[in-house]
Image (spheres, rainbow, N blue to C red):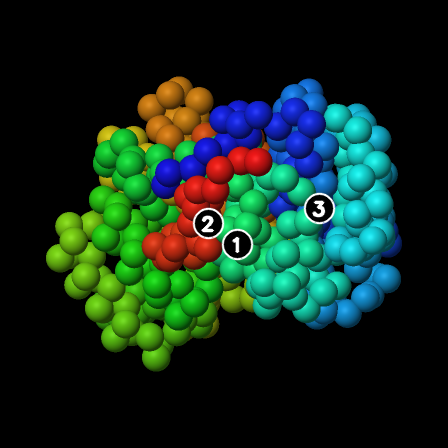
């Protein structure tokens, strides 16, 4: 992808329309996870030090084009100021006179947050008239919201065709990491994917087997593949109606010389609850009254032995019910081994997706991987090989004012 970043242009004295994703977890008007705010800080710091006038664009929730006070971005101001160590002004609209008044009052190095983009229907519709109203406020467009890049909205795609477009530092880092994962990786490459259903990840699985040398399957989706091969999966969650699709994926993987690795043993219970009595049995010989809820210890040894020479790893989805201890053991064991190899410098590791982030945080290794994506939908669409409108738009060249 041919794009420039904020370090490639002169921003001094320029008004920057910075697309961020501040759709952060919150309860009772308080931010409960500042990860996305923290990741935006390097871009904010750079633009402020370079003398830019920063106008932040973001959405929050799904107000569906209506002015909804419960979804106002006003509550974010104090959290932004605390995380970034600077004053943040607030405009009660993202277009029109109120937004323009705040924009016109900014001095070099100042930062302002504009009200929720999705209070206007034109945002999601990518309405040219709405794009034009946003563009009046700025000189340069900066996209630092990879997690919203799979949407062709006014602020993620439309603005890039009206103002000179460049990437923020977080966006650039994400794209570099993803390029190193599947597009131009160090080989051999292994992907780890889990979850409850293969039906929701068909495109991901088909794309991955074309890109990687090994594919580790975990979670309930692994049961479907084991069942498709004639295994007994007992009372385990399984999409029996997807067995033909599973066979097609196995055949496609063989054609592409991708080795699919399935659990060889499983942690099983009769009832899923805290403190449930559990045992380990062969993954294809599960008693009829028991269910698999985690990859067993022999599976982890098998996986690690098979991928010992891999140089790149991509992870999306846990191996089991990691939310309930000790049924996080399989995911934790693999995660810790991946983290150790990453720290040793023998592995590049990239992970993403909501459950994946939570699982690796639970294992205590989220900060030890090469890169952890906070994107959900955008990361999944990238795994499917789909073009991301917000990323593609950055290659659109328009001479800076």
Residue 164 at x, y percent in the picture: 53, 41
C-alpha distance separating marks 1 and 3: 16 Å
Residue 297 at x, y percent in the picture: 39, 44
Picture residue at 57% right of the left edge, 60% below the top: 153
Determine whether label 1 and label 2 are within 8 Å by CB. Answer: yes
Q: Is residue 16 left or right of residue 290?
A: right
Which residue was labeled with disc 1? 157
Instruction: Using the image as rendered, state which of residue 177 and residue 349 is in the foreground.
Output: 177
Mark nearer the viewer, 1 or 3: 3
Q: Quadrant of the C terminus?
A: top right
Q: Quadrant of the N terminus?
A: top left
Instruction: Using the image as rendered, state which of residue 82 and residue 98 is in the foreground.
Output: 98
Mark nearer the viewer, 3 or 2: 3
Picture residue at 81% right of the left edge, 66% below the top: 67
Q: Is residue 268 left or right of residue 107?
A: left
Which residue was labeled with disc 3? 137
Instruction: Using the image as rendered, state which of residue 58 and residue 358 is in the foreground.
Output: 58
C-alpha distance separating marks 3 and 2: 20 Å
Secondary structure under tag 3 reads: loop
Which disc number belongs to residue 393? 2
Residue 126 at x, y percent in the picture: 58, 63
Residue farthest bottom in this picture:
241
Instruction: Using the image as rendered, state which of residue 17 and residue 261 is in the foreground.
Output: 17
First-in-chain label (1 vs 3): 3
Residue 92 at x, y percent in the picture: 85, 53
First-in-chain label (1 vs 2): 1
C-alpha distance separating marks 1 and 2: 6 Å
């Amino acid at each position: 992808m041919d794009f420039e970043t904020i370090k490639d242009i002169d921003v001094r004295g320029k008004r920057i329309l910075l697309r961020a994703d501040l759709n952060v977890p919150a309860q009772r008007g308080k931010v409960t996870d500042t990860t996305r705010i923290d990741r935006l800080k390097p871009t904010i710091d750079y633009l402020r030090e370079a003398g830019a006038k920063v106008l932040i664009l973001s959405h929050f929730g799904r107000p569906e084009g209506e002015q909804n006070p419960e979804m106002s971005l006003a509550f974010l101001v104090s959290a932004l100021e605390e995380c970034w160590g600077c004053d943040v002004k607030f405009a009660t609209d993202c277009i029109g006179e109120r937004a323009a008044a705040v924009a016109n009052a900014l001095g070099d190095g100042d930062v302002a947050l504009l009200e929720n983009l999705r209070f206007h229907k034109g945002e999601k519709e990518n309405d040219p008239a709405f794009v034009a109203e946003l563009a009046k406020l700025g000189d340069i467009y900066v996209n630092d919201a990879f997690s919203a890049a799979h949407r062709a909205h006014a602020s993620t795609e439309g603005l890039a065709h009206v103002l000179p477009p460049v990437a923020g530092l977080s966006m650039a880092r994400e794209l570099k990491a993803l390029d190193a994962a599947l597009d131009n990786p160090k080989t051999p490459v292994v992907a780890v994917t889990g979850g409850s259903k293969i039906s929701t990840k068909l495109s991901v699985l088909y794309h991955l087997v074309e890109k990687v040398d090994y594919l580790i399957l975990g979670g309930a989706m692994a049961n479907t593949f084991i069942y498709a091969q004639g295994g007994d999966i007992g009372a385990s969650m399984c999409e029996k109606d997807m067995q033909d699709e599973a066979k097609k994926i196995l055949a496609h993987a063989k054609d592409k010389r991708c080795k699919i690795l399935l659990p060889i043993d499983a942690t099983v219970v009769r009832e899923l609850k805290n403190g449930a009595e559990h045992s380990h049995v062969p993954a294809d010989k599960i008693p009829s009254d028991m269910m698999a809820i985690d990859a067993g210890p022999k599976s982890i040894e098998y996986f690690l032995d098979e991928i010992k020479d891999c140089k790149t790893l991509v992870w999306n989805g846990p191996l089991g019910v990691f939310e309930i201890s000790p049924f996080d053991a399989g995911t934790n064991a693999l995660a810790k081994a991946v983290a150790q190899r990453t720290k040793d410098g023998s592995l590049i590791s990239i992970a993403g997706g909501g459950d994946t982030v939570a699982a690796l945080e639970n294992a205590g290794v989220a900060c030890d991987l090469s890169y952890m994506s906070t994107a959900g939908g955008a990361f999944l669409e990238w795994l499917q090989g789909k073009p991301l409108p917000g990323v593609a738009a950055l290659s659109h060249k328009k001479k800076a004012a």
